[in-house]
Amino acid sequence: MRIEIDNKKLSKALENPRTMRSEFGRLAESIQDRLSEFTGASCLDEIPTCPPPVRHKLQGGLWAVRLSRNYRMVFKGEGGEDPKEITWVTILRIEDYH
């Protein structure tokens, strides 16, 4: 699956493991795991809805995957509404929305 990142600051933080660790601390390993899962999948349907990623749909056509108990990687799926049709994602933010 193709991955795009919505803004330059987040892009810079996610492209380098060292920067990722300094920016996100303990979340860096989970972020890298989720990015690897996205890269290895051909569509969003291949990202599990059970732990650890826990893919789930949010309001407004957005999606999220779990990084920790509270933190999520929020993204927009491109290519359709059905997870089987979504072949690339745009990562919007990493946040604690609880």
Image (cartoon, rainbow, N blue to C red):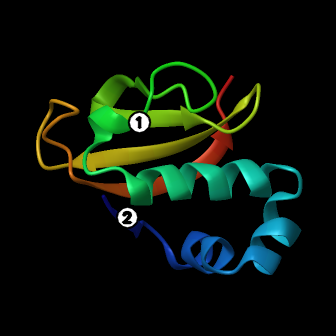
Q: Position of residue 41 (x, y in %)?
A: 35, 50
Question: Looking at the figure, which quarter contains the N terminus?
Answer: bottom left
Callout 1, which amino acid? Ile
Badge 2 marks a residue whose secondary structure is strand
Q: Residues within 10 Å of mark 1 (few under 14, many from 20)?
A: some
Badge 1 marks a residue whose secondary structure is loop
Q: Residues within 10 Å of mark 2 (few under 14, many from 20)?
A: some
Instruction: Report the side of 41 relative to 93 (left or right).
Output: left
Q: Earlier in the sequence, mark 2 or mark 1?
A: 2
Q: Nearer the viewer, residue 42 or 69?
A: 42
Q: Nearer the viewer, residue 25 or 48?
A: 48
Q: Nearer the viewer, residue 43 or 74?
A: 43
Toward the front, the furthest residue is: 40
Q: CA distance from mark 2 to mark 1?
A: 14 Å
* Depicted 20 relative to depicted 65: above or below: below
Quarter holding residue 57: top left
Callout 2, which amino acid? Ile
Q: How many marks?
A: 2
Q: Position of residue 19 (x, y in %)?
A: 78, 78
The residue positioned 12% from the left and 49% from the top of the image is 79
Instruction: Report the side of 82 relative to 98 (left or right).
Output: left
Toward the top, the furthest residue is: 50
Q: Position of residue 23 (x, y in %)?
A: 81, 67
Label of residue 47 in the image: 1
Quarter holding residue 6: bottom left
Question: Looking at the figure, which quarter contains the C terminus?
Answer: top right
Instruction: Report the side of 65 relative to 16 (left or right).
Output: left
Q: Nearer the viewer, mark 2 or mark 1?
A: 1
Quarter holding residue 4: bottom left
The residue positioned 35% from the left and 24% from the top of the image is 59
The residue positioned 55% from the left and 75% from the top of the image is 11
What residue is pinned by disc 2?
3
